[in-house]
Image (cartoon, rainbow, N blue to C red):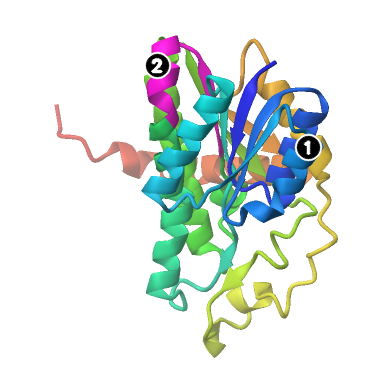
Amino acid sequence: MSTWFITGCSTGLGRAFAEALLTRGDNVVVTARDVSKVQDLADAYPDTALALPLDVTSDTQVADAVAAAEKRFGEIDVLVNNAGYGYRAAVEEGDDEDVRQLFDTHVFGTVRTVKAVLPSMRARKSGTIVNLSSIGARICPEGSGYYAAVKSAVESLTLSLRKEVAPLGITALVVEPGGFRTDFAGRSLRQAAEPIADYAGTAGKRRKENDTVHGTQPGDPAKAAAALIEAVESDSPPYMLLLGNDASTAFRTALDALRTEVDQWELVSRATDFDQ
C-alpha cells in the first residue's frame, strides 16, 4: 500500500486518479480549494482517504496539508501535482493579473508542493513526484500561449528535478495529456475578458463561445489513471508520459517539424563559433 498526495481532486483527472487509487486500496490525500468537493471520497473510504483544503498558491496551506498528510499516514510516497486550469487568450489579450495567477498556480504551485515533500523523501531516499503538463507545451495552439508557457515551464522544471533527485533514490516524471473528457474546456476554462477583433480568426476560434470540443474529447479519465499508476510503479518510469492518441500523434508531428527546421538551419547554427 502506497500513500499518494494529489492536488486538484475536485473534478477531472485529479479525481479520476484518486478514485482509481482508493478503489485498489492505497492511501490517498485528496485535496481541493473547496474541501467539500472531495469530502465524499473521504466519507466513502474513511480508513484510506484524507480530504484536505489546499490552494497551491498559499505557502501556509501547502505546508499544513503536507504536515497533516504525514501525521495521518506517516509518509508521502507519490506526489501528483495536478491542480490547475485552462486559460485562453491571444498573447496581446492576456490580462497581466490573470497571467500572474496562472503562473502562480501551475508553476509556483508545483514548486511549493515539490519543496514541501522533498525533505522527507530525501531522508528516506525514496519517493515519486509526478507533475502534470500538457501536450499544449509541445504544440502551442493559437490562443494558448500563456497556458503553453506554464506547462512548458513545468516540463523543463521536471527534467532538471529528475536529474537532481535520481541519485537520491527519488523519481520525477512529467505527464502530458491530450484532450480528456473533463471540465477542462468547460467550467474550468478561463479566458481574456476583452477579445481583440484582429485575432478572431486565430485565438478567437478557441474562445469558449466558439469552441465545440467540450464534451467530445477522446480521452477517458479512468484509463488515464490506470496509465499513470502503471508508469509510477514501473521498474523504469518514463521521464515523460503522453496520454491519449491525440497527444502521441501531435507530439510526433511537432517533433518531426522541429527536426526538419533544425536540419534546414544547421549550417547557419554551426557557423557562429569562433574560427579555430
**What numbered label is drawn on residue 276?**
none
State the SS at label 1.
helix
Q: Residue at x 83, y 62 (%)?
A: 215
User: The C terminus appears in which quarter of the rendering?
Assistant: top left
Identify the residue position indicated by label 2 in the image.
122
Q: Do the residues labelled 1 and 2 touch (CB within 8 Å)?
A: no
Q: Residue at x 45, y 71 (%)?
A: 91
Quadrant of res 210? bottom right
Q: Does the magenta stretch include residue 129?
A: yes
The amino acid pointed to by label 2 is: Arg
**Circle 1 crowding by C-alpha within 10 Å: few under 14, some 14–19, many from 20:** many
User: Picture coordinates of residue 272 (x, y %)?
Assistant: 23, 40
Among the two numbered marks 1 and 2 on one chain, the one whose residue lies closer to the N terminus = 1
Relative to 270, 66 lies left or right: right
Relative to 184, 91 lies left or right: left
176 up-or-down from 170: above or below: below
Q: Which residue is drawn at 68% across and 47% down?
A: 250
User: Picture coordinates of residue 255 (x, y %)?
Assistant: 59, 40
User: Foreground residue, 132 or 243?
Assistant: 132
**Circle 2 crowding by C-alpha within 10 Å: few under 14, some 14–19, many from 20:** some
Q: Residue at x 53, y 86 (%)?
A: 198
37 up-or-down from 229: above or below: below
User: Foreground residue, 103 or 9?
Assistant: 9
Identify the residue position indicated by label 1 in the image.
19
User: Foreground residue, 3 or 35?
Assistant: 35
- Magenta segment boundaries in residue numbering: 117-131
User: The N terminus appears in which quarter of the rendering?
Assistant: top right
